[in-house]
Each structure stands twice: as structure tokens, then as C-alpha cells.
Image: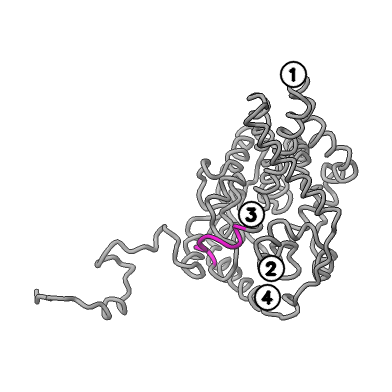
């Protein structure tokens, strides 16, 4: 499907094609609805637990809990602040890098920014770029079916962490062979990380976050490892996972009421702007991943805009207000606040039918 969205690059692309785009958009939405009704896409999945990964996550979460305890009893304030800064950096590696740049191609970046984002995403340890993006493209293409790696219809726990500790559904592997990944196969930075992923993640995710506090401000190895490494790592993971779980269950659906992804402010705050999920699934090519450019609940957009100012980020795609309002009016759940509300009796949005059905008490002839 071709999407000629506006491009934020000094000049906004001509939006005269918006009506045609809406028709194309809605035809695809209808096709997706029909695809999701196919019983074969939602057959009960066989659960085969991978116990090694279960043990890894159990140990990781216990380590994070201990790290949180140490924050209050012995960890130096510099180490805690360092852990917070690493959460922001690794989180932006996921949101601005893995998600908006490489998965959705919602903007372009020059090689220095792409290299920095590669390192930041490696610190997050959520798999290498190629596989993360393959999973995410399949997730968008086949949302909440058995092909979706973290199908939210299988419940909060499965879409949050359970999908990582069981064998994938066979439909997923079929889609891995079909999803287009040709752009990433020719990206030298993506392939470099994929080739050296294990040594890179050990160095950037575990060794450096532990050694820097020890070397520069004489933190203990215990405090450094459990706070700036494990607590930071597990916290970042859970913030990302909430986008797959909570933001597919709770919240309004102002742009498309027929899909599970929703608008969730809490998730957006924790995931650095990724909680505006109903909008994102309707307009996945928008570099803001949200209708509003409010930096307070979308730090990732601020990050991309900063690098646009220095010329490292460019061709940032976004969606016109007119197109958003049309889509919200046609497929949303009615919760969209802009333009479709009614201020009172003489508002032009009140239909003639509603006026006729309104009871007027103690009416006087004028």
C-alpha cells in the first residue's frame, strides 16, 4: 500500500490526495478485519515453554528488585542518576532507533545518528535490529492474530512477557519468510550489529554500566551491577513490554475503534512517547507516533527533532490534521477531542435528526 503522507523537511508535501488515501486506508482496514475473522489465524496455540529463558527473566527480575532495594540503602546518588540516564539512552535506542527509524522508516538518519542509535539499542538488549524489526513489522501487518509475536488476544501476561518464553506459533514463522526485510539486509550498520551482537551487548549492556560507576566514583561492584545494570535493564524491558500489553488493552481508540491498540498516557510516559498506540497503528509512518507534538509525553519526538535541527535526521513523515480528523470521524470511537465535539444547541455538528428527537420542555412560541 502506498502512503503519500506529508514530509516534514521544510516543505510539507501536497495533501490534495488525502481523500484518495482515506479510501485506500479504509479498504485495507476492511481487508484486515476480514483476515482477522479467518478461524485459522486464531486457533488455540500449543504452549511450549522455553525454561532457559524463564530462568533468565526470573533471575533478572529478582536482581532488579534487589537493585531497587540497594537504591534506598547503599547505592550512591551518582549511580542512581547514571542508571536513570542509561534508561533514557537505551529507551531512545528502542523508540527512535529500532521502532521509528528501522521498523517503520518514518524518518531518515545520517550514518553518525544511525550508529549512535545502534549502540543505544544494543544497550537495551531487546534483540538485534534485524530481528526486532522483523517481529515488529509482522506485529503491525498481522496485529493480534497468531502470526503476531505478542498477540494481545492471548491476554496481558502473554503479550507482556509470555511471548518471549514460549515457542512461537507456526503462523509466525510463515510470515517471517514473507515480510519484506530487504532494506535492512543492505544496511551496513544493521548487519554490523547483527554479526557482532553478542560481544557488543555484553560490553554495552552489562560490562560498561557496571564498570563506569566503580571506576569514576568508587561505587561498589554490587551496587553498580544490581542498580545501573540489572535494575536499569529490567525496567527498560518492562516499559517496552507495556506497549505490547497495556497499550493493546486499556485506553481510548479515537482513530480506529475496530483494533485493540489504544491511547495510553501512562505507557507513553514510561515508554518515552510510544503509548499513543491507536494513532500509531493507524498511521505507523508518522515519525511522532502520535497526533500531537507534545514533548512532555513524547520524549522520542523531541530527540528526533533535535537531530533534525543539526541535520542528522531528515525526511520526517507526518500526517495532515485534515486526514487525521477524517479518519477519526469515520472509524474512531468518538473520543477524539478536536473538531467533532458539540458546544451546544446551535452547533453546526448537531444533526437535524437529533434536533427533531430532542424534547423541549415549557416551549414558547417566538
Residue occupying image coordinates x 77% and y 47%: 126
Q: The C terminus appears in which quarter of the rendering? A: bottom left
Q: Nearer the viewer, residue 245 or 139?
A: 245
Report the Cα–Cα distance between label 4 and label 3. Answer: 21 Å
Q: Label 2 belongs to which residue?
A: 154
Earlier sequence position, callout 1 versus callout 3: 1
Q: Compare marks 4 and 3 and give the one earlier in the sequence.
A: 4
Residue 16 location in percent, x, y?
53, 61
Q: Is residue 32 left or right of residue 53?
A: left
Q: Earlier in the sequence, mark 4 or mark 1?
A: 4
Residue 225 higher or lower than 14, as above or below: above
Helix, strand or loop for disc 4: helix
Q: For the residues carrying marks 4 and 3, which lies nearer the camera in this image? A: 3
Q: Secondary structure at mark 3?
A: helix
CA gap, disc 3 and disc 2: 15 Å
Whether residue 253 is in magenta: the answer is yes
Residue under numbered circle 1: 218
Instruction: Return the disc, 2 or 1, that comes first in the chain's sequence.
Output: 2
Q: What residue would you read off at disc 3?
A: 243
Q: What is the spatial separation of the Cα atoms under label 4 and label 1, in whole angstroms?
A: 56 Å
Instruction: Write the start and end of the magenta stretch as one range.
Output: 246-256
Q: Which residue is mark 4?
A: 36
The residue at the point 52 percent across, 46 percent down is 293
Number of the front mark, 3 or 2: 2
Q: Quadrant of residue 245?
A: bottom right
Amino acid at each position: 500500500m502506498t502512503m503519500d503522507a506529508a514530509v516534514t523537511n521544510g516543505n510539507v508535501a501536497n495533501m490534495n490526495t488525502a481523500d484518495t488515501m482515506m479510501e485506500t486506508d479504509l479498504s485495507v482496514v476492511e481487508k484486515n478485519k476480514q483476515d482477522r475473522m479467518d478461524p485459522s489465524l486464531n486457533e488455540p496455540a500449543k504452549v511450549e515453554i522455553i525454561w532457559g529463558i524463564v530462568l533468565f527473566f526470573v533471575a533478572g527480575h529478582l536482581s532488579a528488585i534487589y537493585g531497587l532495594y540497594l537504591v534506598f540503602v547503599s547505592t550512591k546518588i551518582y549511580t542512581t542518576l547514571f542508571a536513570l540516564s542509561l534508561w533514557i539512552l537505551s529507551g531512545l535506542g528502542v523508540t527512535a532507533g529500532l521502532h521509528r527509524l528501522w521498523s517503520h522508516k518514518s524518518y531518515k538518519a545520517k550514518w553518525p545518528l544511525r550508529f549512535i542509535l545502534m549502540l543505544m539499542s544494543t544497550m537495551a538488549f531487546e534483540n538485534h535490529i534485524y530481528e526486532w524489526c522483523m517481529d515488529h513489522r509482522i506485529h503491525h501487518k498481522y496485529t493480534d492474530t497468531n502470526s503476531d509475536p505478542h498477540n494481545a488476544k492471548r491476554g496481558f501476561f502473554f503479550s507482556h512477557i509470555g511471548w518471549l518464553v514460549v515457542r512461537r506459533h507456526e503462523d509466525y514463522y510463515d510470515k517471517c519468510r514473507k515480510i519484506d526485510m530487504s532494506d535492512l539486509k543492505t544496511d551496513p550498520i544493521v548487519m554490523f550489529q547483527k554479526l557482532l551482537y553478542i560481544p557488543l551487548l555484553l560490553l554495552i549492556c552489562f560490562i560498561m554500566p557496571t564498570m563506569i560507576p566503580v571506576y569514576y566514583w568508587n561505587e561498589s561492584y554490587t551496587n553498580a551491577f544490581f542498580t545501573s545494570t540489572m535494575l536499569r535493564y529490567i525496567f527498560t524491558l518492562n516499559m517496552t513490554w507495556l506497549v505490547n500489553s497495556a497499550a493493546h488493552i486499556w485506553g481510548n481508540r479515537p482513530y480506529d475503534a475496530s483494533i485493540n491498540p489504544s491511547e495510553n498516557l501512562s505507557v507513553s510516559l514510561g515508554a518515552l512517547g510510544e503509548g499513543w498506540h491507536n494513532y500509531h497503528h493507524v498511521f505507523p509512518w508518522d515519525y511522532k507516533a502520535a497526533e500531537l507534538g507534545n514533548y512532555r509525553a513524547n520524549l522520542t519526538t523531541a530527540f528526533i527533532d533535535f537531530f533534525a535541527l543539526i541535520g542528522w535526521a531528515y525526511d520526517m513523515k507526518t500526517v495532515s490534521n485534515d486526514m487525521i480528523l477524517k479518519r477519526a470521524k469515520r472509524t474512531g470511537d468518538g473520543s477524539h477531542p478536536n473538531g467533532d465535539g458539540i458546544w451546544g444547541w446551535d452547533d453546526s455538528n448537531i444533526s437535524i435528526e437529533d434536533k427533531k428527537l430532542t424534547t423541549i420542555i415549557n416551549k414558547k412560541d417566538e
